[in-house]
Image (tube, rainbow, N blue to C red):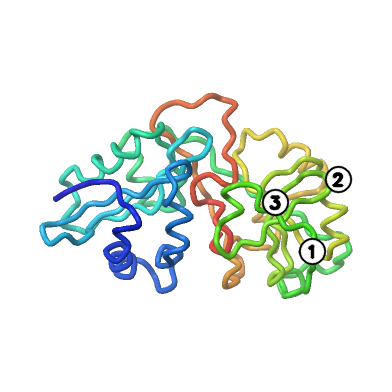
């Protein structure tokens, strides 16, 4: 078996692999999305294992952010497992940056435990519902709503070039993703909490959320201003389609120790993928 870095020239093989191992309409089955995620070495790389028939039987993706290679989209066919293939694919990613990951399921956590990675506190997701909504239920908070933000369109960095995302920049400098189908605003970076709220409610949003790591001291300000952890809110993680009551603990891990001041940004890894989480 051969392990190497993938390129867009491998697309036919990649598409066949992603169709076989992932659910229908998975983002990686779209060539434009793959190119956004892995087509530029500044932002991410894709590493593959090929068998003797030149078919892809294993894949590891790495998203680059914060001078870290965030391991995502890990899948190996059964015949690859237990043969050191994953270590070789991780080694290719390590050639770029130190390794880290976010994991939301038992299998992922078990993998990193076996690899003796460092496990940090779970990430946190804070939610604020528009105070004008007097009876905040899922049905009257997460509903389609026409919200015109064309005058605020933002494509200022790679994250906001993600296919299908509607990025905006507010007056205070905060950046976010608009999701009018559920009347929500997904904050990516918050500059001024008060101004963010005022403009968001004026635009017509019913809720805002913000994902970060536990050591982000901005969360203290959010708590003081009435933002709550997601499980205390009616706004679930999964909104495309909406899954009522779906909340998720996502753990942040790294292969080697990171500085105590390192904060996990929404654009890192795939925990902040809009539409799925």
Disc 2/disc 1 C-alpha distance (Å): 15 Å
Check whether the beta carbons of the residues at disc 3 and disc 1 lie within 8 A of each other. Answer: no
In the image: residue 150, left or right of residue 20: right
Quarter-of-image position of residue 134: bottom right
Residue at image x 57%, y 73%?
A: 241
Answer with mark 2 or mark 3, whichever residue precedes in sequence: 3
Answer with mark 3 or mark 1, whichever residue precedes in sequence: 3
Q: Residues within 10 Å of mark 1 (few under 14, many from 20)?
A: many
Secondary structure beneath dot 1 equals loop
In the image: residue 239, left or right of residue 202: left
- Residue identifier under label 1: 205
Check whether the beta carbons of the residues at disc 2 and disc 1 lie within 8 A of each other. Answer: no
Residue 194, numbered label: 2
Secondary structure beneath dot 3 equals strand
Residue 88, numbered label: none
Examine the rendered structure and indicate whether residue 193 appears above or below residue 182. above
- Residue identifier under label 3: 187
Give the x, y percent position of residue 46.
Answer: 35, 50
Q: Residues within 10 Å of mark 2 (few under 14, many from 20)?
A: few
Towards the viewer: 166 or 247 = 166
Examine the rendered structure and indicate whether residue 99 appears above or below residue 22. above
Give the x, y percent position of residue 233.
Answer: 70, 59
Check whether the beta carbons of the residues at disc 2 and disc 3 lie within 8 A of each other. Answer: no
Give the x, y percent position of residue 243.
Answer: 58, 70
């Amino acid at each position: 078996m051969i392990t190497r870095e993938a390129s867009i020239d491998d697309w036919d093989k990649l598409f066949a692999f992603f169709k076989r191992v992932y659910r229908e309409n998975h983002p990686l089955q779209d060539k434009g999305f793959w190119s956004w995620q892995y087509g530029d070495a500044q932002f991410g790389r894709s590493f593959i294992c090929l068998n003797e028939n030149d078919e892809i039987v294993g894949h590891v993706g790495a998203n680059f952010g914060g001078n870290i290679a965030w391991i995502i989209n890990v899948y190996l066919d059964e015949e690859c497992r237990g043969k050191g293939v994953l270590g070789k694919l991780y080694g290719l990613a390590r050639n770029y940056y130190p390794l880290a990951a976010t994991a939301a399921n038992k299998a992922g956590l078990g993998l990193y435990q076996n690899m003796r990675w460092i496990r940090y506190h779970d990430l946190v997701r804070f939610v604020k519902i528009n105070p004008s909504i007097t009876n905040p239920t899922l049905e009257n908070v997460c509903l389609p709503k026409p919200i015109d933000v064309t005058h605020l369109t933002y494509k200022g960095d790679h994250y906001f070039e993600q296919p299908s995302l509607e990025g905006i920049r507010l007056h205070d400098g905060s950046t976010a993703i608009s999701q009018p189908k559920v009347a929500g605003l997904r904050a990516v970076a918050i500059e001024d909490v008060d101004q963010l709220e005022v403009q968001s409610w004026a635009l017509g949003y019913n809720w805002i959320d913000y994902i970060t790591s536990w050591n982000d001291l901005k969360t203290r300000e959010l708590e003081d201003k009435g933002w709550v952890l997601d499980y205390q809110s009616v706004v679930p993680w999964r909104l495309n389609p909406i899954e009522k009551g779906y909340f998720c603990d996502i753990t942040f891990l790294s292969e080697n120790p990171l500085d105590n001041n390192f904060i996990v940004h929404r654009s890192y890894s795939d925990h902040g993928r809009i539409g799925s989480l």
